Amino acid sequence: MPNDRPRNPSGKASPPAAEPAPRDVTRLPSPLPLFVRALLSSRKPARAEPLPSLAFARRNVLLDAGDIARYARLCGFTASQGVPPTWPHLLAFPLHMLLMTDRTFPFAMLGMVHLDNRIRQHAALAPGERLDLDVRCGPLFAHDKGQVFTVLTTARRNGVVVWTGESGYLRTGVRAPLGAPYRAALSADPSLAKSAAWHVPGDLGRQYARVSGDYNPIHLWPITARLFGFPRPIIHGMWSFARSLAAVLPADVPSLDLRVEFKRPLPLPGEVTLWREPRSGAFELRDAAGTVPHLRGRWQCAPTAPPSCLDPDLS
């Protein structure tokens, strides 16, 4: 969702000053109770408020080979690409829901718009390893349509940070929003060329819900999507992001810096086209005609990696 105002002076999101001790979650609730809590949160007023000092943690989370393989097949990743860099986001998603449905969290969860994600992977991950996950409230940004808030995720392996994520969400209808003005970080690139076309089946939202645990009703059935204002179900933005990454990322790149901004919902079933510029790492997922972007993204190696790894054909 474009917005022309500057995000903040440095262009980087930073965590709040206070770093609360996270609540350890030893047993995750099932998806249904979480979405009931999300429904109940709709009674919260749409007003600007600071975020609470709220954080959740899961310890010793297994990178399960079977779960990863099912997710990789659904999103198009190959075995040579290793553990998909979006996988830790899925492991942390139940903690995101616990945070956003907490009684102290000021905004209603249902109706939120997922604006963007930034992922930094600092080392390769492998099935069978275990991670400690930490999820907490990040900074607020003022948007023309309401309040943007961020959720920060950190994954540690043996005490060392190996993966971080920043997820931006928009709560529409909030007047006088708090924080620095929000601005989309990625601009349209006229040099992108069409590289692939895919059919997106009507049941993909249900398939993805089974592997991700995200059973938001807007993704599942026409009747449940219509209850929330969508004539047809729409696919999860994180599937679209993962499917695009699977098509553009080379194998064996352990350190990554990824960005995505979600532009337009992708109705199911549908046809999409992938557009990319390998030298810059920019890509877009568009409609069948190639005119309407569903998402805009960019990938690059982490600064410590050699520049030649951006595209294997350039070395």
Image (spheres, helix red, strand yellow):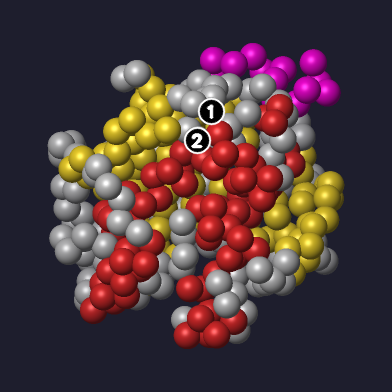
Report the disc number at residue 209. none
Residue 134's place in the image compared with 173, above or below, is: above
Decide which of 170, 161 is in the foreground and name it: 161
Residue 167: x and y, percent?
42, 49
Q: Indicate the quadrant containing the C terminus: top left, top right, bottom left or bottom right.
A: top right
In what element is the residue under mark 1? Answer: loop
Dots 1, 2 in contact, CB < 8 A: yes
Span colored in magenta? 302-315
Q: Is residue 40 magenta?
A: no
The residue under the point 46% across, 38% down is 88
Other residues around mark 2 within 10 Å, as few (<14) / some (14–19) / many (≥20): few
Residue 111: name its quadrant.
Answer: bottom left
On screen, 280 above or below 174?
Answer: above
Residue at mark 2: 64
The amino acid marked with disc number 1 is Pro
Residue occupying image coordinates x 29% and y 33%:
59
Residue 207 appears left or right of 98: right
Name which of mark 1 and mark 2 comes first in the sequence.
2
Percent of width and height locating residue 275: 77, 49
Residue 129: x %, y % from top left: 46, 25
Lateral position of residue 193 relative to residue 156, left or right: right
Report the residue marked by disc 1. 127
- State whether residue 13 appears in this view: no
Q: Nearest the camera: 48 or 265?
A: 265
Q: Residue at x 68, y 61 (%)?
A: 293
Identify the residue at horizontal 27%, vertical 54% (top origin).
99
Residue 314 drawn in magenta? yes
Amino acid at dot 2: Asp
At label 1, counting other C-alpha atoms closer than 10 Å, the crowd grade (few under 14, some 14-19, many 20 or more) is some
